Amino acid sequence: MKISASIYSAKAESLPTLLKELDNHGVNLLHVDCNDDLRVFEDITQIKELSQTPVDLHIISSNPEQYFEAIAKANPAQVSFQYENFRSPVHFPVERSYKIGLAITSATSIEIFETYQTQCDYILLMTTTPGQSGGVFDKTTFQRIRQFQKRFPNTPIQVDGGVNAEVSFILRHLGIQTAVVGSYLFKQETLGAALLQLHRPMVGSHYQVSDFMLSLEDMPVLAAKELSLKKALQSIDDYKMAFTCICDAEGVLTGLISNADIRKGLLKQWEAWPNIDVHQLINRTPLKIQETATIHTLLELIHQIDFPIQYLPVVDSQNRLKGAVLFTQLIKGEL
């Protein structure tokens, strides 16, 4: 996951000193907020003279069209436009060298991206007040990310607001491409220590698994009484998650069937084909985790296991299936 440093959150240092420090620590992008002020482009000119790090511009204006010419001259790597400030629909430049994103707050439905999908390269999910630093991360953003990925699976997501070390880990787990970091980055003892924390695999725990897990309706589940080999295979194929969970009538997790379980079961019962007993393919004691578990507990569990984990069913105190944690997106988030 790329880190875009919000430079206006660092109020104590001069711009040349700040840029030198950020460059020395290998920050991926320099995030610049433009709160309807053309003087921002004077800063961008100076930034480009002092640094080779790409500029990540965020325009917050009721008349974004007035910035198109200045943006073209500044030639940032990417520009996001705050949707809630639009007075009327905006038509972004077609011929451009930079990427364009639509920025929306937590109060705006992700469905609005449909209107701008053909014009935009990515979305910026704001979790705090646009253009203001020091806010607290809105944890409903985790589920908004899931919803957006389901609706627009090929669109990169950038997140801005309240990102700290723990939030960074979850965002990486969810496959987020870029996180804008301001206050957390510049309030630590050193910039290097802050960046290290943002990339650490082990973090403190304030969020629970239930805050960011894949919801039940978005994962493969089969009723035990209706189970068949064909349905198990179809469920795995439909969801492309390499497994399907088996539940009883009360929603209690009774087992799990994975690609590996089917492969091993077929080899074991090959002579019985096509009358293979699908119930013998079920892993009755799958590895799982409680919905109230913290990230620290989740990581401790993973560290105790001596084989790769791609997914974990999430259950409540009664062993009822509530969701799942997938680890495939974590790899994407590190690219």
Image (cartoon, rainbow, N blue to C red):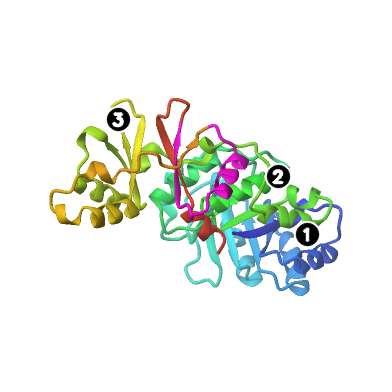
Going from the N terminus, do you reach mark 1 or mark 3 first?
1
Is residue 287 part of the magenta span, yes or no?
Answer: no
User: Does residue 160 appear in the picture of this structure?
Assistant: no
Q: Look at the numbered disc 3 and give the secondary structure of its residue.
A: loop
Q: Disc 1 and disc 3: Cα gap in Å?
A: 51 Å
Q: Nearer the viewer, mark 1 or mark 2?
A: 1
In the image, taking residue 172 as reference, residue 286 lies left or right, namely left
Image point (79%, 65%), residue name? 19
The residue at which mark 2 appears reads as 132
Q: Look at the numbered disc 2 and give the secondary structure of its residue.
A: loop
Image point (30%, 50%), residue name? 236
Image point (62%, 66%), residue name? 71
Going from the N terminus, do you reach mark 3 or mark 2 first?
2
Q: Provide residue 128's location: percent of width, then percent of height.
A: 63, 41
Is residue 305 part of the magenta span, yes or no?
Answer: yes
Q: Provide residue 224's location: percent of width, then percent of height.
A: 26, 34
The residue at which mark 3 appears reads as 248
The residue at which mark 1 appears reads as 192
Q: Disc 3 and disc 2: Cα gap in Å?
A: 49 Å
Name the quadrant containing residue 18: bottom right
